[in-house]
Image: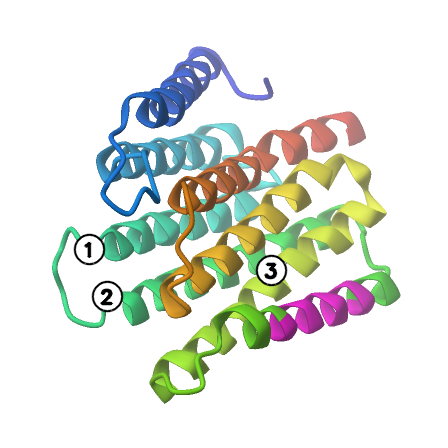
Amino acid sequence: MPIASPFDLLILVLMIVFSGLLLFGFAFGKLPVDRTQRQPRQTQLAQSAVLVTCALIWWLVGARSTEVEAFARYVFLGMSLGFLGDILLSDLLRIRNALILGMVAFGVGHIFYILGYRELQILFGLEDARTLVITLVVAGVVSIGTWMGLVYVPEGETALNVGSLVYGLVLGGMAGYALALALQLPAFLPMAVGAVLFLISDIILGNFLFRQNRWYLVGDVIWFTYVIGQALIVFSNATALTLLAEAV
């Protein structure tokens, strides 16, 4: 692992904790009346907190004073805003407009991820404009199509419909950007998979929240795809640092 001791061990311990929270939270969680989710909110938020901590360690220890530092900082900021979004959507704070505020938090987080991808693009010379344009266009089409087919509510509030569309386009752009980098440098494929999982998770979440499409364990499907996606993005720091070391 491209990080100094004992932080490599700390990262390993944190990932064991993360895996335990994810698996045991699901295994021992209780199904609510609507049978949509076993994973408790407490273990979900704990998993996000672990990923924020990992992102912070990658930034302050692994990438400090290297050419990957800016990318690691953006990933930390993106993951931190994702954690804030998780808190808002969990409804633990009981505040008004939690859904809108959650979308704003996640949306800004996606912008930070995009800024991080731009740092990787420059650092590793991934300047194939054609690939980037094609993936962004495809991502935009997918975002609009899934919004129209799975999220948009004709009789719903205009602010929520417009907000969900804008959010979907930003999220799609984030996933498309990551995919464009992976197509040019396959080592970033896990990062791209993470971004696409994030996109899939939020499409299902939008269908759940806006269309009220509730099916067995839908909440767990949303959470597993989301948090594994986030983990893959956070640990793309290891890929970037490894590639940097190999280039020296």
Mark 1 touching mark 2, by CB under 8 A? yes
Q: For the residue marked with disc 2, what is the amino acid? A: Ala
Q: Name the residue under label 2.
A: 98
Quarter holding residue 208: bottom left
The alpha-carbon separation of the residues under discs 1 and 2 comes to 7 Å
Q: Mark 1 points at which residue?
A: 91
In magenta, the rendered stretch is 133-145
The 10 Å Cα crowd at callout 1, few under 14, some 14 to 19, many 20 or more, is: few
The alpha-carbon separation of the residues under discs 2 and 3 comes to 23 Å
The alpha-carbon separation of the residues under discs 1 and 3 comes to 26 Å
Q: What residue is shown at x 53% (from left), y 21% (from top)?
A: 3
The secondary structure making up most of the magenta span is helix
SS for callout 3: helix
Q: Which of marks 1 and 2 is nearer the N terminus?
A: 1
Q: What residue is shown at x 45% (from left), y 46% (from top)?
A: 222
Residue 184: horizontal and vertical position, in percent?
Answer: 84, 48
Q: Nearer the viewer, residue 16 or 117?
A: 16
Residue 56: horizontal and vertical position, in percent?
Answer: 40, 36
Quarter placement of the C terminus: top right
On screen, residue 45 versus residue 125, left or right, reads left
* Residue 2 to residue 89: above or below: above
SS for callout 2: helix
- Image mark for residue 174: 3
Quarter holding residue 209: bottom left
Q: Which of 80 and 33 is in front in this view?
A: 33
* Residue 89 to residue 75: above or below: below
SS for callout 1: loop
Mark 1 touching mark 3, by CB under 8 A? no
Q: What residue is shown at x 44% (from left), y 21% (from top)?
A: 15
